[in-house]
Every structure is written in structure tokens, then in C-alpha cells.
Image (cartoon, helix red, strand yellow):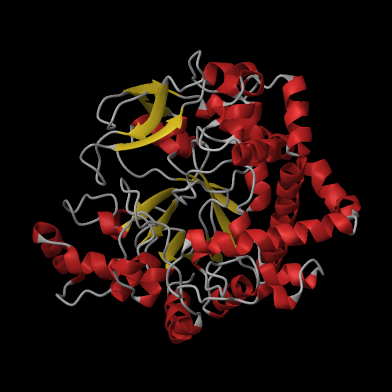
Amino acid sequence: MLSRSSGILLHPTSLPGRFGIGSLGKEARKFVDWLSLSGQKIWQILPLGPTDLSHSPYQCYSAFAGNSDLIDLDEIVELGLLKIEDLTLTKAFPLDSIDYHGVRKFREPLLHKAFLRFREVGGFGWDNYRQFWSENSWWLESYSLFYACRKNIKGKDWSFWDESLVLRNEEALNLYYRTYREDVEFQRFLQFLFFKQWFDLKKYANDLEIRIFGDIPLYVSYDSSDVWTNQDLFLLDKKKKPLMVGGVPPDYFSETGQLWGNPLFDWEKLKLRNYDWWIARLHFNLHMYDLVRIDHFRGLESYWAIPYGEKTAVKGEWLKAHGDAVLKILQSQIGHLPIIAEDLGTITKEVHHLRKKYRLPGMKVLQFSFASGADNEHLPHNYELDFVAYTGTHDNDTTVNWLKTVKGEERDHLRRYFGTTGVDQWKMIRAVLGSVAQMAIIPLQDVLGLEASARTNTPGTVVGNWQWKLAAQDALKEQTEKLKEMTSLYGR
């Protein structure tokens, strides 16, 4: 069971950053300091993997690698691998949004320059690098080669590579490693830096009694090292294309459902291997974070399988997954599971049973509360202890804009529930903090009262997402005492 606590949802990319994007450096520590000052105990983030061109943290090239966009450049200077004058900006980046193309155009040459210096001074022989390699080679070896091949075999996913490479013949793997060795070693260097900075940041947070709440997407991207390396664990045809893909049927977010396009697991093949890939993935994430949310938890009980090639998620079928077996093994290995189940949407009694069997808290979202009557499960008076309560998530509109746009019976229910026409985001925050739910999480945008332009993601769309960035942390100071007082008032 969780201790009674509260925290803030903010992905590190959305931190202020003079090089166009948030990082794991000074601004991240400054944010941790603010969390501590404002009485918070949790920092919830989104997945930290290397994102594809959509920049979605839920579509990554690896389930294990870190996003090199988050590597702090100033800390590379401190390591002696760059000079301070290397970081001179020739043009300013936007303050409140992320220009991913511009960010990478600026950062890539600098990261490569640092890599050359690292190799020149014998960095691959450093004790801390050798330890990193020994602990991570089981995934890093294949990921770094995948990265190098993907960079050099342009415009095509791995299924279009040379057949011997697609099939991972040992001779082909050795040949491409020698051919692209510099890019392979460059990626290993980036992963070394990322994880060094990440665990330094995590220790800093933990020392201030701030727990990091991470996120595991249920599925992995088709164009990923994971699928290329473990083709037998996914439902693929003879041409190595998905037989079926993941998503959800029509729901609150979309009349045509959500078509994610991720390949589906072959649970029978996983069973033959005692679910080793999934168990390794869970252990890896529980090492990275203090708490972990499993996104689309219901897919561990049964999943919506959509025929490959469908344009929407309307056509599909529910198939059984083996999540019970996976969680049973993990529980036998570590005891209590510090996992939160993302159980939003249409959830069956079987999914509820699976969550409760392993004593996993679920989620409640206040923005979902007012579309029906007093029995709506997202209304605070219906919460139970084993839940994490939110005003909204990264997939919701900011609460300020939601309050402006909610209409009709839903608006009337909202007004009657709070007993006033003047509902603001702080009344919503108060309702979540004051609820019986053991944990309450507030998106930073709601604490700051930001408008629609600060929305993180709109499900079912591909343009304009994941770009919001906090211009400066000075704005947080005004909310410190208010948030601290409210948190203390409700015993969090």
C-alpha cells in the first residue's frame, strides 16, 4: 500500500533549458528542490526512452535505452569532454516550446565532439564505463548496433534491411558492427552519459525524500531494437510485418478508438521462456525508478488486437494476455510490487481482479468525473485508498482550459458538485488532495494555471504534441507556499 502523499507530473523535456529542451542537469535539481520546498514527495515522469520522429515517449526505439536529448551539456563540460566555449549559442531557442529539429541540429555535433574526446582519453577503459557495460551489455549491444544501422540504412525500418541482418545472422552482425563501429561506439557513449546523469539525479531526489515515479508503455514500437532482437516474441508474419497491432476500441478520447500500431506480444512464446523478457524489463525499470506505472495495464489481462493495415481501431478482437503469470513471477522474486496500474477506460471485472490480486493501486482522473451521475467512479466521494488521484494526466487538456470548454450537463454537474459557479483549478486540486486516495498527482500545468497551449498530448493526433516547455522556474515560487499549505492540510 502507498503512503499518503502527493506529487507533480512533469516530463524532464518540459523543464526549462537554455539549449532548447529540458535535461537531467541543474534545472532538474532545481525542480527537485522546489518539490521538496512545496511539500511534495513524488515526481512523476513519462517514459525516458529514445523517441521516434513523433517525439512521443510512448514510441521509442528501445524499451531500455535512454533519450540522449536529455543529456545535460554543462555536465559534459564538467567531465572535461567539452569546453565552455563549445556551448555558445548562435541563435536563441523558443522559451516555451521545443523545436526538436533545431535542438538536435545543435546538440549532435557537440555530443559527437565529446565522444571523440572520450575515446581519445581512453574513456572506454574507465572503471565506471566498464561497470556500465558489464551491467547493460545484454540490451546495449543490440541497441547500439540497431541505432547505427538505422542511422546509415536511411528511410527504412529494420524489416527492409539486408536479409542476413534482418535474421540477425552472426556473420552479418559482425560485418555491420565493423562497418558502423564509430556510430555503435557513439551510441554506447551516449547511453553511458545518460544513465550516469540519470542515477545522479535520482540520488539527489531520493536524498531529499522525493521518489521518482516512472512509466512503462505496455507495448514497444515495431521499429525498435526490442522487436528486431526478439522477433520470436512478437506476432509477425513471414515478411516480419505485424500480423495484428495494438490499440483500444472507441472510448472517451476517440469515436474511432486509438490505433497505436504497435506489434503484439506472442504470449505463448513468452511462456516457453518463462516470460524472461518481460521480467527483465520490469526489473530494469524498478531499478531506474522508485515507483512504476504500467501504461494500458488492462493489456496485461486482455488486449485489443487490430488486423494490420486497418485505418482505425474500430475493427478488432479481445485476446487473452499472460499478465497474471508475469506478475506472479515478479512478486515471488521481490515481494511487494511498487507498481501502479493505469486502469482508465473500459475496464472489466477480470482486470480489476488482476490489479487487486497483486495489490496494485489504480488511477482516478477528476476531469472524467462529471459526464454521468453520483456513481461515477472518478468522483472523489467514490475513491478508495488504493488509487492515485489526478486532476488530469498527460493525455488530458490542462484543467484551466478544460474548465473553460466543458459544456452542458457536464458543466452543470461540475457546478453543483462544487456548490459554486466559480470553479477554478485550485478547487479541482483541493478535491484531489483532500480525497481518500493514498496518492495524489497534479500536472505542473494545473499548479501554474496554464492554458491549452501548455497541453502535453492530445490522443489520436500527431501534430503539436510533446512540445510544451516551461520557460523558467521563477513562476513556481508564487505557488510554493499555497501548494505546501494545501498538501499539509490534507496530510500528504
**Count of marks, rendered view:** 0
Left or right of 395? Residue 256 is: left
- Coordinates of residue 384 in the picture (x, y in percent): 38, 52
Q: Residue at x 14, y 75 (%)?
A: 421
- Coordinates of residue 275 in the picture (x, y in percent): 62, 25
Residue 112: image quadrant is bottom right
- Coordinates of residue 456 in the picture (x, y in percent): 39, 60
Q: Residue at x 49, y 73 (%)?
A: 93
Left or right of 30? Residue 262 is: left
Q: Residue at x 52, y 21 (%)?
A: 267
Closer to the camera in the image, 413 or 96 = 96
Closer to the camera in the image, 50 or 405 = 50
Q: Is residue 186 above or below residue 381?
A: above
Closer to the camera in the image, 491 or 307 = 307
Q: Is residue 390 above or below residue 331?
A: below
Residue 90: image quadrant is bottom right
